[in-house]
Image: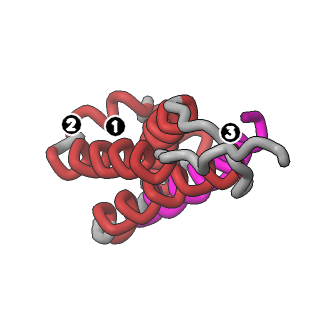
């Protein structure tokens, strides 16, 4: 299962970076990235967990998919905050000074909206669905 977590975490970090960049610069494409990213996280977990081997169905990969999708969403918001602070026009302060002056929650709460909630729902739902395994029936050794 460790391979599944590592594969899913790699996908989650990639999704978070793309979400953060899109949210902070273009503010478009979040739904498509959330849908595709959630499925990619789930698929990575399913592939890492079973590696196409025969197995009994399990809900553990689904839970991992949902958890890593939530982590990707949160990391995406953190990445958006860092990028938004980095591209502030006409700022004379360094990036660490800007980050310290504008805490993440103070920046996030006024602008958190329905689009972000829908993005979270898409990520988690498709992370869960992508990790779902119906199982490949185990056959007794002949």
Decide if residue 31 is on the left or right side of residue 33. Answer: left
Using a 10 Å C-alpha cutoff, classify the residue at mark 2 as few (fewer than 14 neighbours), some (14 to 19) or many (20 or more): few
The magenta stretch spans which residues? 1-24
Q: Is residue 134 magenta?
A: no
Where residue 87 appears, x then y in whole percent? 47, 62
Residue 2 location (% of width, % of height)? 76, 35
Q: Secondary structure at mark 2?
A: helix
Nearest the camera: 44 or 132?
132
**Nearest to viewer (mark 1 / mark 3):** 3
Residue at the spot of label 1? 107
Q: Can residue 80 be seen? A: yes
Q: Residues within 10 Å of mark 3 (few under 14, many from 20)?
A: many
For the point 33% across and 29% down, which residue is it?
106
Tell which circle, 2 or 3, labels the residue nearer the N-terminal end. 3
Name the residue that disc number 3 marks.
5
Numbered badge on residue 18: none
| Quarter in which the N terminus is drawn | top right
As helix, strand or loop, the secondary structure at mark 3 comes to: helix
Q: Looking at the magenta stretch, what is its main secondary structure?
A: helix
Q: Is residue 46 above or below residue 97?
A: below
Indicate whether 26 appears above or below 97.
below
What separation in Å lies between label 1 and label 2 (alpha carbons)? 7 Å
Q: Is residue 44 left or right of residue 32?
A: right
Residue in the image at 51% along x and 41% along y: 65
Label 1: how many Cα within 10 Å (few below 14, some 14–19, many 20+): some
Q: Nearer the viewer, residue 113 or 34?
A: 34
Assess whether mark 2 and mark 1 are in contact (beta carbons under 8 angstroms): yes
| Mark linked to residue 110 | 2
Residue drawn at x 34%, y 71% is 26
**Magenta-colored stretch includes residue 16:** yes
């Amino acid at each position: 299962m460790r391979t599944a977590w590592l594969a899913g975490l790699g996908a989650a970090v990639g999704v978070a970076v793309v979400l953060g960049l899109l949210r902070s610069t273009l503010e478009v494409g979040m739904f498509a990235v959330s849908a595709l990213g959630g499925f990619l996280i789930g698929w990575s977990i399913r592939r890492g967990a079973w590696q196409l081997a025969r197995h009994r169905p399990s809900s553990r990969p689904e839970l991992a998919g949902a958890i890593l999708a939530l982590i990707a969403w949160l990391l995406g918001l953190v990445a958006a905050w860092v990028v938004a602070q980095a591209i502030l026009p006409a700022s004379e302060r360094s990036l660490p000074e800007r980050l310290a002056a504008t805490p993440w929650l103070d920046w996030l709460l006024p602008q958190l909206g329905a689009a972000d909630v829908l993005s979270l729902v898409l990520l988690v739902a498709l992370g869960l669905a992508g990790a779902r395994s119906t199982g490949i029936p185990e056959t007794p050794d002949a």
